Amino acid sequence: MNAASFEALTVESMGQRLGGLAAVRARLGDDPSTWRTREVGDGNLNLVFIVEGDRGGLVVKQALPYVRLVGESWPLPLKRSFFEYNALTRQAKRAAGMVPEVFHFDEAQALMVMEYLSPHVILRRALIDGRELPNIADDLALFMARNLFRGSDLGMDTRARKADLALFADNVELCDITENLVFSDPYFEAELNAHTTPQLDGIVAQLRGDRDLKVTAQRMKHLFAARAETLVHGDLHTGSIMVTDEDTRVIDPEFAFYGPMALDVGMLFSNFWMSYFSQSGHEAGGGRAAMQTYLLGVLERCWAGFRTEFSRLWRTERNGILYQKSLFEDRGDVLGAEQALDEVLHEMWVDLLGFAGIEIHRRILGLAHNADFETIEDPEIRARCETKALLFGRQIAVNRARIHSMTEANALAALIETGAAT
Ligand code: SR1
Ligand code: MG
């Protein structure tokens, strides 16, 4: 990619920059001077614009050569846009209808023109507002099971999988962000860390002195770095999901790489648990009790739905090199295949608890925080919510091999939330 030719888009230059593209004019209208553009990006890394014309709207996303959250002092390669584009095209095939359609990709300018999802909102925002979305558990279960299974040696031709493994292996800098910000920085006094202070100072010191927790975090980092199992989204949080009551879409897979299956599931579940612990900060006096029950229900249903779909794919699409049918079903050993499935799912469960616990910690102790907690203005109230989440994160990560079901994990969350466990 020729970085010299890169030019950041602006609201003013949009018509001139994209007006020559037939695919764009077809969706907005032929006269770029009538297009209305606004910058809406509130993420940590990129520029995002909504462009509207007489015929409809589009989203234009462009990577910047640095981390937007921090500034030009932290350079970040434009090639992340290439990985995002390639991940989106694969996800569109593996879980149809669950990612935005891409109409145009310009690798040199690191920009993508995509479907404008409207009236969708960011899932995290909806959950902060106390809105119960009826379909997210089922939809996200299907999205994860289909992508994780179909991108692995369980479902994919191994030559194609190895080619993809090599392609995404170059997403080094985005993996480096996760390796540091998620798995290491929260557990020492890293420069960019921040937490609610002085309220959390005590528990932060306690967690940083917790040997079992540090070993767990490094074990999860080990899996992240070494288990190139499937094409993961890599940053699957509730800010990477757009919703209406009927529709669920997953966006922003720029962190995609070949990693452990449990990563996406653990990250997503951690965000539902963080939402659970933040609810009392958004409405006092038990006003969010029903919302909390809903969130624990989403976790139960999503994990159950994931298992069901993953098991269906295991029985019907297991055509890769792993656990070949020639060793099991073709020899009449259906139970052998089921035994292997149970082992794979069990290991995924244990690992996802580890990833979930560590992800909770980094969102409270590291650089990139969650609006779930950040929008709680009173620091005393915010710290009370964050403390509970931190305790829960520690409990599920360190004890991941001793928690046997989502019902048990949710019961732990409820014990901590009610103050019965501290
Ligand atoms: C410096 S980037 C910080 C965070 O933003 C992204 O959304 C990822 O979650 C990353 O860890
Ligand atoms: Mg993102």
Image (cartoon, helix red, strand yellow):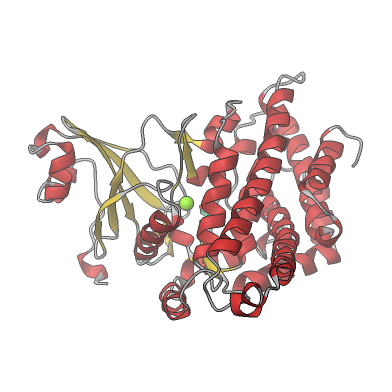
Residue at 57% from the left image edge and 30% from the top image edge: 134
Q: Is residue 358 visible?
A: yes
Image point (70%, 36%), residue name: 297
Residue found at the far front of this picture: 332
Task: Identify which residue, 50 or 302, lies in the foreground.
Answer: 302
Could you tell whether 399 is left or right of 174 in the image? right
Q: Nearer the viewer, residue 316 or 263?
A: 316
Q: Give residue 236's position: percent from left, percent from top.
A: 54, 52
Report the residue that reaches farthest toward the right.
420
- Could you tell whether 287 is left or right of 57 in the image? right
Tell me the quarter of the image containing the N terminus. bottom left
Expressed as whole percent of the image width and height from the top left, the position of residue 3 reads: 26, 69
Percent across and percent down for residue 323 are: 63, 76
Direction from residue 80 to residue 373 in the image, left or right:
right
- Residue 40 located left or right of residue 69: left
Q: How many marks?
A: 0
Along the line of sight, which residue is nearer the eye, 175 or 138?
Answer: 138
Quarter of the rendering occupied by the C terminus? top right
Q: Is residue 202 above or below residue 354?
A: above
Residue 124 vertical position relative to residue 189 in the rendered view, above or below: above
Rendered residue at 80%/43% (across/down): 407
Q: Relative to residue 41, is residue 175 depicted above or below?
A: below
| Quarter of the figure with residue 324 | bottom right
Closest to the observer, 35 or 113: 113
Residue 332, given in percent of the width and then of the height, sits at 68, 73
On the question of residue 188 being in view, the answer is no
